[in-house]
Amino acid sequence: MPGYAMLVPFAVLFIVFLVWPLLNSLWFAFTNYNGVKPPQWVGLDNFQRLWFEDERFRKAIANSFIYVVAAVTLTTVLSLVLAVAFRGTSWRDRIMRTLFFLPAVTSTIAVALIWRWIFSVEEFGLANTVIGWFGIERVQWLASPGWTIPILVLMAVWGGCGYGMVIFVAGINAIPEEHYESARLDGANGWQQFWYITLPQLKPVTTYVVITGLISAFQLFEAIYIIFRAVSSVGGVQDSGLMLVPYLYDMGFTKFQLGYASAIAWTLFIIIFVVSMIQIRVTRALKEL
Amino acid sequence: MRRNLWPTIARLPLYVFGLTMLVPFYWMLTAAFKPVPELTKNPPDFVPRDPTVDAFYDSVYDPDVRHDQVVPGLFQRFVDVPGGFWRFMFNSLLVATTITVLSLLLASLAAYALTKMDLPGRRVIFVVIVASMMVPWQVSLIPNYLIVRNLGWLNTYQAYIIPALAKAFVVFFLVQYMRSIPNELIQAARVDGAGEWRIWWRVVMPLMRPALAAMAIFVVLGEWNNFLWPLVIVQDDTMANLPVALSRMNASLAFNPQNMAVIMAASLLTSLPTVIFFLLFQKHFTRGIALSGIKG
C-alpha cells in the first residue's frame, strides 16, 4: 500500500498537467478553437492548411532547418575541439571550461538583451564599431533580414558550446587510458589517437550532444521574441526569424487560433521525433560498420 | 621543451576565443555603469569614463519634474509595483526554490516506489513516463494554459508552481541512479522493522545525494530562466518573474538608447544570482550536467 501512496502525488500531477494536456492538444489540433466557444471538429483541415497552404509556416520551417543545421553543426564541432583542448585538470583548463560554460547559466532573456545592444543599428553598437576598425561600413544588423539567422546562430554557438564541451570532457575522461598507451606503443601520433580512439569511443556522447542540440534548437523562442519581434508579429522583419515555437506562440496567444496552434505543436513533435529517430538509426548503422 | 610548448601555441587561438566569450558580459557590465551621454557616444568607450550607478538609482531624478536627460533608475522605475524591482527577484526566488524542493521530493518518492517496491504495473508506469519525455513541452502549453485559466489561477503563484511539479525527466534520472543502490540494503532495513517511508527518507535519500544535487541544479536553472510559461500566465506586473519583467521593460524602453543602461542593469541583476551560484558550486554544476547529460 505505501508504494502507491508514494507514487500518487507525482502520478496525479503527471496525469493532470502532462498526459491530459497532451491528449487535449492532440484533439485541439483537429478542431477549430478560439478558447471561448467550444472546439469544433474540422478533421485534417488544420494540417492541410498548415502543410500545404500556409506561406508563413513554410517560412518558419525553412528558417528552422537552416538555423538548426548551422547551429548544431558549429556548436558540436566547436564543443569537441574545446573539450579535446581543455579536458585536463590544470587550473588553466578549469578556468577555460568555466568561461565557456558561463553563458549556459545566464538568463536567456538577459543574454538576448545584451546581444540586442551589441547589434544595435547605430554606430555605438559594438558590432558596428568593430567592423568600423576594418573600414567596413555600418550594417543595419537587426533590420536586415539576411542577418537574422547568422546572428541567431552566433548566439547559439556562444551559448551552447560550453554545455557540449562539458559533456564531451566527461566522455573523453571515461575512455580507458590503456587504449592510448597501447596506441602510443604502436607509434600512433596525437592526430591518429584522436581519429582512431577518441572519436569512435565518443560516438554515443556525440549522438547525445547532437540530439539534445537538435531538440533544443527546434524549440528556439526567447532570442527571436526579444531581438527580432516586429511591431505586428513575433517573426521579425519579413518573418526572417520566424520559427516553429514563435509561430505557435503567435497563433495561440496573439491570434487565439488555439486549434491551429496545436497543429503547429504536433508538427514540432513529429519533426523532432523523426529527426532523432534518423539520428539514432544513422549512429547505430555507423557503429556496425 | 619543444614538446611542451607546441600544445600551448596550438591552443592560443582557443584562449583568444575564450576571452571573446566574455565580451558580451563585459559589455553588459560596462553599459550598466555608463552615464547617459556615454551610452550613445560614437564610437563607444570600452571603459566607462565616468562610471555611475544612476542606472540603478538616480539621485538627481525627481518624478515631479520633467527632465530631458535624466532617466529614472531601475529601483525608481517600478513605482506601480509594490516592492519595485525586488518584487521580481522575490517572485523568481520563491518560484524556483519551491518548485525545486517539491518536485525533487515527489520525484524521489515516485522513483523509490518504482524501483524498490513490488508494485504491479510499475513497468507500464515507467514506460509512460519515459514516453512523455519524447514530446516537447510546448505541445502541452495551450491545454495547460486553459486548465490554469479555468481554475482562475492566472496571475498566481499556483500557476507557476503546481503544473511544474511533475518532472518526468527527474523521475527517469533518479530511477536510473536508484537502481545502483543494492536491494539488500533495503531488505536489511525492512528486516530491522523500518517502514517504507522511513527507509526512503533515512536510507535511500542520503545515498541519493549526488543525483539529487545534480537534479536540483538542473531544475533551479530551468525555473530561474523560465520564460514562455510565465509570459503566458502572468498579466499583472506584480506577478512577473525576472525574465518576464525584463522582456516587458525592454518592450517599453528599448526604442530609446538612453534607457539601455537601465535594461543592462536589470539584466545584470537577473544573471548575477545564477552566475555566483555557479562559480561557488562549479564542481557540482558541471558534474551534474555531465551526469544528467550522459545518462539522459
Image (spheres, coloured by chain):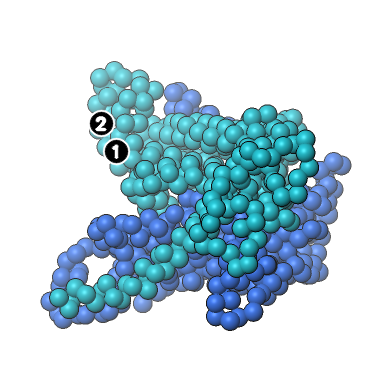
Chain colours: A blue, B cyan
Residue pictured at 36% horizontal, 77% vertical: A289
**Along the line of sight, which residue is nearer the eye, A203 or A94?**
A94
Q: Which mark is residue B185?
A: 2
**Chain identity of mark 2:** B
Give the residue at the far top of this rendering: B193
Dot 1 falls on a residue whose secondary structure is loop
Mark 1 on the same chain as mark 2? yes
Q: Is residue B280 left or right of residue A177?
A: right
A83 sits left or right of A118 in the view:
left
Closer to us: A149 or B192: A149
Mark 1 crowdedness (10 Å alpha carbons): few <14, some 14-19, many ≥20? some
Relative image position of residue A120 (x, y in whole percent): 65, 64
Within 10 angstroms of label 2, few (less than 14), some, or many (20 or more) residues? Answer: few
Q: In the figure, A173 relative to B199: above or below?
A: below
Label 1 is placed on what type of residue? Ile
Q: Quadrant of residue B241?
A: top right
Q: Residue at x 32, y 72 (%)?
A: B11
Give the residue pinned by disc 1. B181
| Circle 2: residue type | Leu
- Residue farthest right in this picture: A37
Q: Chain of mark 1?
A: B
Tell whether B180 sits left or right of B250: left
Q: Residue at x 24, y 58 (%)?
A: A90
CB under 8 Å between callouts 1 and 2?
A: yes
Q: Quadrant of the N terminus of chain B?
A: bottom left
Expressed as whole percent of the image width and height from the top left, the position of residue B162 reads 60, 33
Q: State which quadrant residue A217 falls in.
A: bottom right
Evaluate whether residue A177 shows in this view. Answer: yes
Residue A208 seen in render: no
Query: Is residue A71 rendered to the left or right of residue A229?
Result: left
Cα distance between the residues tagged 1 and 2 = 8 Å
In the displayed orientation, state which residue is furthest to the left.
A185
